[in-house]
Image (cartoon, rainbow, N blue to C red):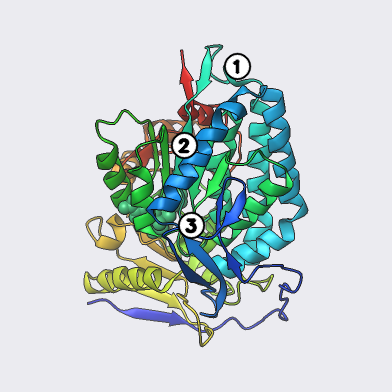
Amino acid sequence: MSTEETRTRIVWDYAPAPESPDHVRLRDSYGLFIGGEFRDPLDGRRIHTINPATEEPIAEVAFAGEADLRAAIEAARVAQPRWAALSGLERGKYLFRVARLIQERARELAIVESMDGGKPVRESRDVDIPLAAAHFFHYAGWADKLSYGVGGRDVAPLGVAAQIVPWNFPLLMAAWKLAPALACGNAAVLKPAETTPLTALLLAEIFQEAELPPGVVGIVPGDGATGAALVRQPDIDKVAFTGSTVVGKDIQAALAGRGIPLTLELGGKSANVVFEDAALDQAVEGIVNGIFFNQGHVCCAGSRLLIQESVADAVTGKLWARMGRLRVGDPLDKNTDVGAINSRDQLERIEQLVSAGEEEGAMRRTVACELPARGYWFAPTLFTEVAPAHRIAVEEIFGPVVSVMTFRTQAEAIAKANASPYGLAAGIWTDKGAKAFEVASALQAGVVWQNTYNQFDPSAAFGGYKESGFGREGGPAGLRPYLRIS
Ligand code: NAD
């Protein structure tokens, strides 16, 4: 039988510090960005995008139909040879301009990201938007040095890239996709996720302001059906997808035999491993950042916490105390640590897996806090007494829920960390450098952090092993998926 424990509210508090959306200039309705302009959909439809913290509509957005996708690809096809014929230096200038315009509109973009997706504005402001600009700066620098990025070989662009991004880091994922594609001389048609299309549409305005040649980028919001139709279009030369493993497999099947290069950045169930010699207070901060950053809607979230048995009680005690000081609520409040769950569907997925954890016998502890009456919320949750076969230890929850397991030896830690169909990221907490290197080399994970977690930099490659996908984004490795190399 599982037991549930709750913790009473924190005893001290901050005054509210809401960020004002007053200066945000959103249109009532957005068309599709095709051929450098916003167009009415040909056979698409219009939907309202919802603020998940209030359930209020924010703006109307066009979703692309088949004819719209064909038009976007056609515009990209026309634009691509001229874009590729520009010198790398010239393409780089456009990307620098885009990066600077993102910086100029950073506050507005951060607020819109938080309104549309539910993430705390502190994170949009300090992580999502600066990193999106940094990606454009980084690849602007590569545009005239492509050959150096691939060991001095000859390079050519692939053509038109179809790109699909998820809702957890909407602008940042768009930047991860678009910046390297454009630097390499490709055109791109990008589909944002259905629940978070707004910052990609503001990015389209930025492309207009930067006078990016029309057609080089198309932005076609839509749902899964739009994404499925996009990857099945005949006239594309590359597909790059970030999202769930199940959809990644569907895309792989759709591309089978067509000779179209594919990059897949998929899900994860990443292990965060705490050894007994770690600085435990520092580790607890890293655990909190690893799983509660962006409500746990992070592909590389440290959702499997492996603690050495000798310090397990100490670490879970400190973690539980720290969780009680997390502020859950209004994403636009600058003091908020955990914002709204992105959508009702995602909230239901989290609730379902948390119920499975209780039914299978793990012990659940959820922070007791006042949650707003409207919107989608899930309070930070810790599971102990988790067995490796429990669903909460195996499946991606993609929410603010951490499952704790223990180990005795280094070998057992490695075996448990690798016992997952995924292999995206891992964290290692230890004072011993040699141990960190030894363990990192044995982990099947695309990224391994030592004594930190969720650190991103445009110059560092990111990507997965096993069911977490293939191909790398970021740094010179991120150029390869967008080049024909000879
Ligand atoms: P999802 O796969 O349902 O959706 C992702 C995107 O794909 C959305 O734009 C969606 O509209 C589109 N899509 C849905 N069905 C499609 C289909 N059949 N064909 C083509 N496109 C389709 O995933 P989600 O729930 O929106 O996002 C969460 C998932 O994304 C998690 O599994 C997470 O781990 C993963 N993710 C991975 C990374 C990474 O870099 N590895 C980064 C962020 C998120």
Q: Residue at x 73, y 37 (%)?
A: 96
Residue type highlighted by circle 1: Tyr
Q: Nearer the viewer, residue 236 or 278?
A: 236
Q: Secondary structure at mark 1?
A: helix
State the quadrant of the N terminus. bottom left
Residue 298 visible in the shown view = yes
Q: Which mark is residue 187?
A: none
Residue type highlighted by circle 2: Ala
Q: Residue at x 35, y 73 (%)?
A: 348
Mark 2 is surrounded, within 10 Å at the Cα level, by few (under 14), some (14 to 19) or many (20 or more) other residues, namely many
Q: Is residue 29 left or right of residue 227?
A: right
Q: CA distance from mark 2 to mark 3?
A: 16 Å
- Does label 1 or label 2 sit earlier along the sequence? 1
Mark 1 highlights which residue?
148
Q: Nearer the viewer, residue 34 or 224?
A: 34
Q: Are marks 1 and 3 in contact (CB under 8 Å)?
A: no
Mark 3 highlights which residue?
221
Residue type highlighted by circle 3: Pro
Q: Are marks 1 and 2 in contact (CB under 8 Å)?
A: no
Q: Secondary structure at mark 2?
A: strand
Q: Is residue 203 left or right of residue 453?
A: right
Q: Position of residue 98 (x, y in %)?
A: 70, 43
Mark 3 is surrounded, within 10 Å at the Cα level, by few (under 14), some (14 to 19) or many (20 or more) other residues, namely many
Mark 2 highlights which residue?
161
Q: Is residue 353 left or right of residue 216?
A: left
Q: CA distance from mark 1 to mark 3?
A: 35 Å
Q: Are marks 2 and 3 in contact (CB under 8 Å)?
A: no
**Where, by quadrant of the figure, is residue 384 drawn?**
bottom left
Q: Nearer the viewer, mark 1 or mark 2?
A: 2
Q: CA distance from mark 1 to mark 2?
A: 22 Å
- Does label 2 or label 3 sit earlier along the sequence? 2
Q: Secondary structure at mark 3?
A: loop
